[in-house]
Image: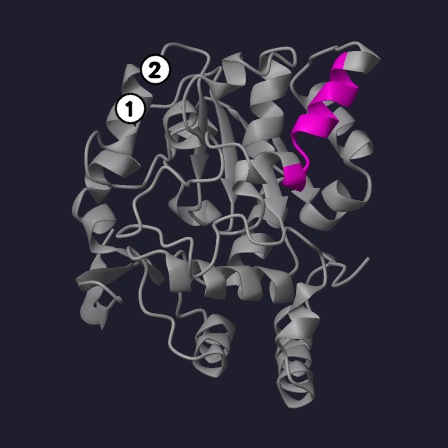
Amino acid sequence: MHLQETFFLSSAQFPTLFNILGGVLLPKRVCDRWDQIWNFRARPDDLLIATYAKAGTTWIQEIVDMIQHDGDIEKCKRATTYLRHPFIEWVLPGPFSLELAEAMPSPRTLKTHLPVQLVPPSFWEQKCKIIYVARNAKDSLVSYYHFHRMNKNMPEPGTWEEFLEKFMAGQVLWGCWYDHVKGWWEAKENHCILYLFYEDLKEDPKHEIQKVLQFLEKDLENEVLDKIIHHTTFEIMKDNRMANYTFQPPAVMDHSISPFMRKGTVGDWKNHFTMAQNEKFDEDYRQKMARTNLAFRMEL
């Protein structure tokens, strides 16, 4: 894929380069190894977890891991989420995520924030199962803004007003929220994709986790299911060092600015949007979601 443009953004700690690949803003270090990412060889029994950033990625990972290990808490604390379920596209210091994935025995659970059109073709060729979690645009925006503030690998977000404008224009890492959620929604018609909503998981976790169980063809006793529900609540996971990213040094993630696991609620956008911003966002939202039957709840 052609890199159309390279430009410079600054983070709080150091300057970082980002590229636009296929119309999607990505870290330059990802684009530099794009051929390896694009040619990644999926296996038929791979499970891919796909989300837009800050849409419940770590949450669904923990749910899936606990299902796969029959609710065994200690097994699910064997390593951080980054090592248990590596990103297929992230390039970080130390082992490259893809190299971690390639070294894993089958069956593997992998994850991605890539929009559907940038997912390596082998996942479709191998007919892999994919779980996608979508979160409403306003809460996604708020969570992403605070993530940019605390994560020193991300571009400097600017003010809340400035970041809101960038988000609406799709000028944020991993691209346009609208294109992302709609692209995966359409893809589920032709591929083995379980499309879940963050708001549904918050409202009725048992019902949604049962969907995951069925999708993964697992059968667990009710007491194990209840155990999974309890140990994947926000309150429990917030204190789980294998999931809350507190193992990262402040130079990478500064939890004193904003914790990685901040609130995990539905409707927090009301504490950020002014009335004028909300009206502007709603009008833009109506236009961009006009031709889809995909619907989100902004509050519970």
- Residues tagged 2 and 1 counted as in contact (Cβ below 8 A): yes
Callout 2 environment at 10 Å: few (<14), some (14 to 19), or many (20+)?
A: some
Foreground of the two, 81 or 194: 81
**Tag of residue 100:** 1
Q: Is residue 238 visible?
A: yes
SS assignment at label 1: helix
Taking 146 as reference, is 30 left or right?
A: left
Q: Amino acid at mark 2?
A: Met
Question: Which residue appears at 59% of the width and 14% of the height?
Answer: 68
Please provide percent x and percent y for residue 7: 19, 70
Please provide percent x and percent y for residue 60: 59, 34
Residue sitting farthest toward the front: 256
**Tag of residue 197:** none
The residue segment tinted magenta is: 224-235
Query: Circle 2 is placed at which residue position?
Result: 104
Question: Which residue appears at 52% of the width and 55% of the height?
Answer: 180
Question: Which residue appears at 47% of the width and 32% of the height?
Answer: 241
Q: How is the image coloured?
A: one colour
Q: Is 139 rendered above or below residue 73?
A: below
Taking 155 as reference, is 137 left or right?
A: right
Q: Amino acid at mark 1?
A: Leu
| Residue 8 figure quarter | bottom left
Taking 149 as reference, is 294 left or right?
A: right
